[in-house]
Structures are given as structure tokens and as C-alpha cells.
Image (cartoon, helix red, strand yellow):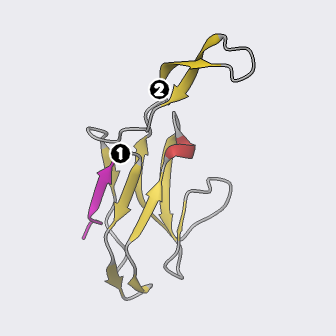
Amino acid sequence: MKPKIKVKDSKLTIAGFTTETTGKVAQKTLDLSGHAGEYLRIWLEKDGAYSTDKRRDHFWQVAELQVPEQTYQEKLTKDAETGEETVIMEPLPINLDGVEIQTFDLPK
């Protein structure tokens, strides 16, 4: 059985499930904004928690994906003191629509 995953904007939601090893695992929503431009792996721990920490060992890999790069929009603003107009680069939300997510069978 593979995990059921939904995406909306920069959030990825993994539906809850139950396995013999972990017991009941609650639904989890991860905000991937902090992972822009990264190849991300999502792991499940034996206690049912999720992790994206690539610097340690984990119990089970659940999914992996390439998170899109951060995009920006130019925004014209006025300096409150001087009244001068300046252009700032405002980050746009990461859009995960259309991103290929590889999922792996859940543990028994």
C-alpha cells in the first residue's frame, strides 16, 4: 500500500494510515516553503513521526520530490520617510501542482 498524498500551494498532506510496525499514523501536513529548490525525501519514524532530516538514519522512506525553486514578484513600494519609490522582490508561494512525487510502499 502506498501513502495517499495531496498537495495545495506549498503544502503536502499525507493521509493517515495504520501499519503493524507503527500502529496508527495521523494525517500530517508539511509546509515545504523552507525547502524551495531542494530534492526532498520524507521519512517515517517507528513512533509515527515524519522527518525530512537527511543527516540521520530513518525507519522508512515514504516519498521524494523535487521542490520547485522560489519565484518572486516585483512590487513597487514607497519609503515612508523619503517618499521615494523602490522596487522590492516579494516571494510568491511555492506551487506543488504538477510536481512528480514518488511514493514508496508503506511498511507492513
Q: Position of residue 78 (x, y in %)?
A: 61, 18
The 10 Å Cα crowd at callout 2, few under 14, some 14 to 19, many 20 or more, is few
Query: Which is more toward the observer, 77 or 44?
Result: 77
Q: Which numbered dot is residue 9?
A: 1
Q: Position of residue 75 (x, y in %)?
A: 51, 20
Residue type, mark 1 in image: Asp
Task: Residue 71: give its label.
Answer: 2
Identify the amino acid type marked 2: Thr
Above-or-below relation of 98 to 64: above
Image-based side of 1 in relation to 25, left or right:
left
Q: Secondary structure at mark 2?
A: loop
Q: Which residues are magenta?
A: 1-8
In three-dimensional space, the C-alpha distance between marks 2 and 1, rounded to whole angstroms, equals 13 Å
Q: Residue at x 41, y 46 (%)?
A: 10
Q: Is residue 9 left or right of residue 71?
A: left
The percent position of residue 4, horizontal first and vertical second, equals: 26, 64
Q: Nearer the viewer, residue 43 or 5?
A: 5
Q: Is residue 1 left or right of residue 71?
A: left
Q: Work out whether 1 lies above or below 86.
A: below
Are discs 2 and 1 less than 8 Å apart at CB?
no
Q: Which residue is at 62% across, 53% downward?
A: 54
